[in-house]
Image (tube, rainbow, N blue to C red):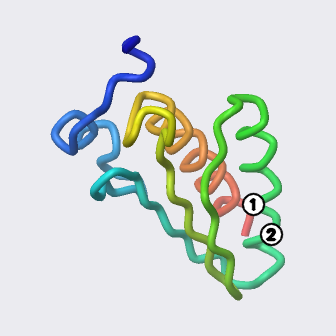
Amino acid sequence: MSAHHALLLPSDTADTLAGTAFSHRPGKLHGEYATGDFAGAVSLLDQVAAVAEELNHHPDVRLVYGRIAFELSSHDAGGVTERDVALAQRIQALADAAAGTV
């Protein structure tokens, strides 16, 4: 298995995820954001969709009024890999930028 597909433990991701909305749960990263309204949640999803396409790595998404949640897992590897951490960091950056424009 390449380093790109090596499974990460919570201890491997703790420092990187500190200060983000993401937590390392069994087999996945989970992050949830309050957006204030449905349009804000959809806007963040649109931005994340573009990044997911760029990285060719796609999150599971739960969208409700004023909230959006992402679950990241490398299904082909059976858990969390560097791809998930990289996507989590990009999602956090987008959420931070969106919060700054409200």
The picture quadrant where one finds residue 52 is top right
Q: Position of residue 93 (x, y in %)?
A: 59, 45
Image height of 76 relative to 5, above or below: below
Element at badge 2?
Answer: helix
**Which residue lies at the image location 31% right of the left edge and 31% below the top edge?**
7
**Furthest residue toward top:** 2
Proximity of marks 1 and 2: CB atoms separated by less than 8 Å: yes
Q: Which residue is drawn at 38% across and 40% down?
A: 80
Expressed as whole percent of the image width and height from the top left, the position of residue 61 reads 64, 64
User: In the image, 10: left or right of 81?
Assistant: left
Q: What residue type is labelled 2?
A: Val
* Residue where numbered disc 1 is placed: 45
Q: Quadrant of residue 22?
A: bottom left
Identify the residue at horizontal 34%, vertical 23% (top origin): 6
76 shown above or below 95: above
The residue carrying mark 2 is 42
Residue closest to the eye, 94 or 4: 4
Query: Which of the 4 image quarters holds residue 8?
Result: top left
Amino acid on which disc 1 is placed: Leu
User: Marks 1 and 2, how far apart in space?
Assistant: 5 Å
